[in-house]
Amino acid sequence: MIRKRWIWFLGVWIFWLAPVSGQGLFEQAVSGSSSGGIQLNGVIRGLEWAGEKAESAKWEQKSMYSEGALKLKAGLGNRGDAFMDVRLRAGLPGSIEGNGIDMREAYVNMYFGKLSFRVGQQIDVWGRADSYNPTDNITPVNPLFHSPDPDDMRLGNFLLKGNMQFTQSLSLEGVWIPVYKPSVLPVNPDINPMVNFTQTQMPGFDLKNSGYALRLSYDRPAWGMSLSWFDGFEPYPGLMFGGVSQGPDHTLRADINPVPFREQVAGMDFETSVGSFGLRGEFGYRRTKDHQEHPNMAWPDLRYVAGVDRTFGSFTVVLQYIGHYVPDYTEPADPDDPTQSPVLLIQYFNRMMFRQLDRISHMVSLTPSLSLLHDELQIELYGEYNFTTKEYLIYPKIQWKVTDMLQLSMGGNIFHGDKNSLYDMVRPLMNGVFIACGLTF
């Protein structure tokens, strides 16, 4: 009943706006904090994703959905504006993308000279590196979301954010995270009937369980850098052994409980250019307390990314080095040893997920892209290789701009890793090919 009322309300809202749009809605809207008026845009698209089936050589439907996104921006004069992003989605029952109405973002901006505030459901992305961002800990992600746009993997959360612009170049940003929202773990809960993944054990609503972050940024036309501090719960919860329970068919199964843990992350990032090369870097030191007594926790580590990019006409290439260093490293348990306790085996999974199976790990990523036919055809290939674990990922994508509003895209994922590696586990969930068609307005 609630869903029907939402759909009815949304339909009336669109119907009411339609005559205004026909009279020049976009011409009346003015962007920026000093504007008034309304901007309405969005996208309608359909996607089909097919891939390999777990524990089988056969292929199956991984995802299939139709989606409509409405994005509304309302100007409130010099004192503020508001933004809303609503997604309506229908597809395969029980799919990871979910069906129904998804309020992805809905927030209000308020401006008081050099001081501004943002309150509401929002997505806040930190860091300057591509794909791997050690300082990006504010809002969660869903890495299993099937979409040609990686930004669709990001999830919104309720935040209170303030920004103080001291000078044109120097600013201080503060974020308060009142309630924790977890990222989606890259596991298939139905892959083994002897394992039962429970719901995430959410922290209570006490103020002590809220999180906060600070970032001091200095940005000039030729270069920029920022220093950051995060104190809150890691977006990805760790796993803990919850004992043995009886399943629906009266068989015994092991309960696995996702349990969030608190961490502090000190970070720094920068970007600049040297001649025709763009340079960027990002560093984050993570600190956790009593990690040796809590198997769900990540160990303290240093994560760092260094990248360079160069454009040659219509061809662009981005090369990155990604490294991890675990100061208090100890050898993890062997997942193939049946004598090991479930606690040690789950700890092995946690360290694999946080890339802490080795004291030092090295990985590179390469992203070449080519623009053809006056930017109507975009060809992109993302590839990464982990020298330490011998895992690799290849993600090709082709996007054809049929008209100014109509786009067709095709691509796929190829995850590969040795047995019991992270990419070996993700492979049945993500490997496959997709085709998507979207219309923007």
Image (tube, helix red, strand yellow):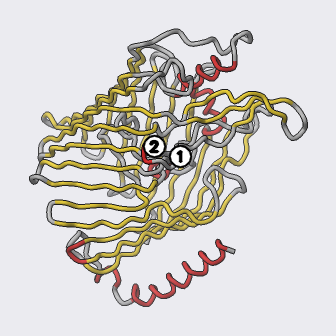
Local crowd size for mark 2, using a 10 Å CA cut-off: few (<14), some (14–19), many (≥20): some
Relative depth, front residue between 81 and 313 = 81
Residue 318 pos. (x, y %): 32, 35
The residue shown at (23%, 69%) is: 32
User: To which residue does mark 2 refer?
Assistant: 209
Q: Do the residues labelled 1 and 2 touch (CB within 8 Å)?
A: yes
Residue 110 falls in image quadrant: bottom left
Q: Determine the CA span between mark 1 and mark 2.
A: 7 Å
The amino acid beneath tag 2 is Asn
The residue shown at (46%, 36%) is: 234
Residue furthest out toward the right: 250
Residue furthest out toward the left: 167
The residue shown at (47%, 21%) is: 290
Say which element carries label 2: helix
Q: How many marks?
A: 2
Q: Horizontal placement of 418 versus 312: left or right? A: right
Compare marks 1 and 2 and give the one earlier in the sequence. Answer: 1
Say which element carries label 1: loop
Relative depth, front residue between 114 and 206 = 206
Vertical comparison of 256 with 344: above or below:
below
Local crowd size for mark 1, using a 10 Å CA cut-off: few (<14), some (14–19), many (≥20): few
User: To which residue does mark 1 refer?
Assistant: 204
Q: Quadrant of the N terminus?
A: bottom right
Residue 441 pos. (x, y %): 43, 72
